[in-house]
Amino acid sequence: MRDFLTERAKQLKPSGIRKYFDILDTLPNAISLGVGEPDFVTPWDIRSAGIRSLQKGYTSYTGNRGLPELRQLISRYLAQRFRVEYPAERIIITVGASEGIDLALRTTCDEGDEVLVPDPAYVSYAPIISLCGGVAAAVHCRAENGFIMTPEAIEAAVTARTKAIILAYPNNPTGAVMTCEQLEAIVPVIEKYDLLVISDEIYAELTYGGKHCSVASLPGMKERTVLLSGFSKAFAMTGWRIGYACAPEALDKAMLKVHQYTMLCAPRVAQHAAIAALAGGFQDDFASVGQMRAEYDKRRRFLVKSFNDLGLTCFEPRGAFYAFPSVEATGLTGEEFVERLLKEEQVAVVPGNAFGECGDYHVRCSYATGMRELQEAVARIARFTEKLRKNR
């Protein structure tokens, strides 16, 4: 029998995260700081809207773009919160922001095209680029620069085949945020090389000490930006799988065609729930989001201080819900640290190199878990690092 697998499927590497969770499943007393998922339950008013939609029998497809009411709310939300104006008819409701990433890359990435990706960054970008026939080119983001994409780093990564750049801020795994001034600094480079921007803004509502700035709000950038976001992180709606994509007209039409032939539409019940998430108004902060952000902030400050006190130098995250400490002082790589910590102290974190080469001596720790679990995890990590020091 012939080998039916494509070369792209063969070359696709398994997730650098998954194997640790497989081990975790065998350890009943383990604590996981690995999953990037809110430990909060979706607020009741949002859940009840989903329940009511089922009770009313709203179980059919929606139009491919999604419910008009939801798209209108998203249009108003983006304009009022982030000064980005997209008409409802140019918004596609997607199955999570992840589908939006796939749509953006499938409609823009030809064979051999290069797409600049921040390193470190979310694990899915490079594999999707590869599946589209493109090449992911790393833009090295260093702790000393706040893990942001600098004009110099972008210039160093650009080639004649570079077509697009992915911006992912607030960033997973580092928690880095790019301010409006920092984004403005890279605009001339983006324009110089005529690059498309794919901006993943799923953590926009989870910033600490400042408000999110969308690159699409900057002069001249909306015309070359695909803005992707969703409800998973801010509204604790990961399992509802509801996101959205906004793009320039030609790209929007192409993305809609791919969406029509693949997903058709996002789940109707999730769309009704998302309407409830936005329907209360958004001129000011959402109450539920503000409460979650305040709790994350408390955990963030605890975890960063704890790592620094242990000698594991930790960049202060300004968004999302991850800390990205360096473990170089232990003499171990991030991967070695993770494997030993899991086996010896039953604490699961993620090796930094799962997010790119720049993460070789880092680990990612999610603080989207309760304070009690965080405190116990830190106690175990302290015991582990002390043991390493004694054995050196």
Image (cartoon, rainbow, N blue to C red):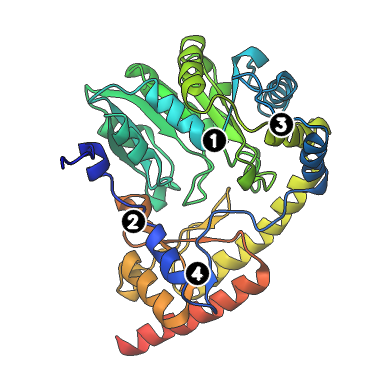
Q: Nearer the viewer, mark 3 or mark 4?
A: 3
User: Hey, what amino acid is under mark 3?
Assistant: Thr
User: Hey, what amino acid is under mark 1?
Assistant: Ala
Tell me the distance, in whole angstroms, between the alpha carbons under discs 1 and 3: 22 Å
User: Hey, what amino acid is under mark 2?
Assistant: Asn
Q: Upstream in the sequence, badge 1 or badge 2?
A: 1
Comparing 314 with 324, the one in front is: 324
Q: Secondary structure at mark 1?
A: helix
Residue that label 2 marks: 353
Q: Residue at x 40, y 42 (%)?
A: 124
Residue that label 4 marks: 308
Q: Is residue 38 left or right of residue 256?
A: right
Q: Nearer the viewer, mark 4 or mark 2?
A: 2
Residue that label 3 marks: 59
Q: Upstream in the sequence, badge 1 or badge 4?
A: 1
Direction left: furthest residue: 2
Compared to 341, does 289 lie above or below?
above
Q: Nearer the viewer, mark 3 or mark 2?
A: 3
Q: Residue at x 47, y 26 (%)?
A: 262
Tell me the distance, in whole angstroms, between the alpha carbons under discs 3 and 2: 42 Å
Q: Secondary structure at mark 3?
A: loop
Q: Are marks 1 and 3 in contact (CB under 8 Å)?
A: no
Direction front: furthest residue: 1
Q: Are marks 1 and 4 in contact (CB under 8 Å)?
A: no
Badge 2: how crowded within 10 Å, few (<14), some, or many (20+)? many
Image coordinates for residue 153, horizontal then vertical, percent:
32, 37
Tell me the distance, in whole angstroms, between the alpha carbons under discs 1 and 4: 33 Å
Residue that label 1 marks: 97
Q: Residue at x 26, y 25 (%)?
A: 113
Q: Is residue 245 visible?
A: yes
Residue 1 occupies quadrant: top left
